[in-house]
Image: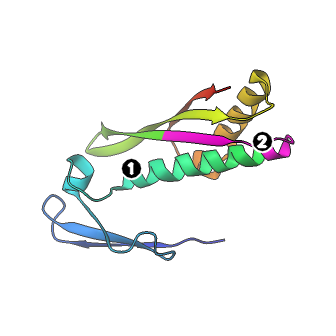
Amino acid sequence: MIRKARAVWRGTGRDGDGDLTTDSGVLSSTPYSFKTRFEDTPGTNPEELIAAAHAGCFTMQLAFLIQRAGLAAEELTTEAAVSLVPDGEGFKIDRSALTLQAKVPGINQVKFDELARMAEKNCPVSRLLNAEITLQATLIS
């Protein structure tokens, strides 16, 4: 399986702008720029997209693991907070902090913790990231 996205940039790094488009059409000429990345201008940025990818990947991985355990999640809500920090002459993503709230009828705390840790370690985006990954998982009864 191969998924594709395209980036177009016009101008300089600080004053230029660009847009992102995915084959699925979910992103279609979606604006990104220095201001959408480092300020609060509407648009997206690479870190936000990585956070969305990580939250989605982890949550889907956990849903499959819960299903494999013979249960079904009522709701899994995950936030991923990706940190961009200075690194030498540039920047790097050094952390993705996952925060999960889960409603899973019939699961006990020990099994929930085990499955959440497995999902954190094994979702493809976690395996791709060269960053610290943390998980705070809360089971809601």
Q: Is residue 94 left or right of residue 18?
A: right
Where on the picture, by quarter, is residue 126? top right
Whether 42 is drawn above or below 11: the answer is above
Quadrant (top left/top right/bottom left/bottom right) for the N terminus: bottom right
User: Identity of the amino acid at label 1?
Assistant: Glu
Whether 37 is drawn above or below 13: the answer is above
Secondary structure under tag 2 reads: helix
Q: Residue at x 32, y 57 (%)?
A: 44
Q: Residue at x 24, y 57 (%)?
A: 42
Q: Position of residue 96 (x, y in %)?
A: 48, 38
Q: Residue at x 62, y 45 (%)?
A: 58
User: Identity of the amino acid at label 2?
Assistant: Ile
Whether 67 is drawn above or below 16: the answer is above
Tell me where the magenta segment starts and ends, as one range.
66-79
Check disc 1 and report the residue beneath it. 47
Check disc 2 and report the residue beneath it. 66
Q: Residue at x 79, y 24 (%)?
A: 108
Front position in the image: 28 or 5: 28
Quick one: label 2 or label 1, which is nearer the N terminus? 1
Asked which colour scheme the image uses, the reply is rainbow
Quadrant (top left/top right/bottom left/bottom right) for the C terminus: top right
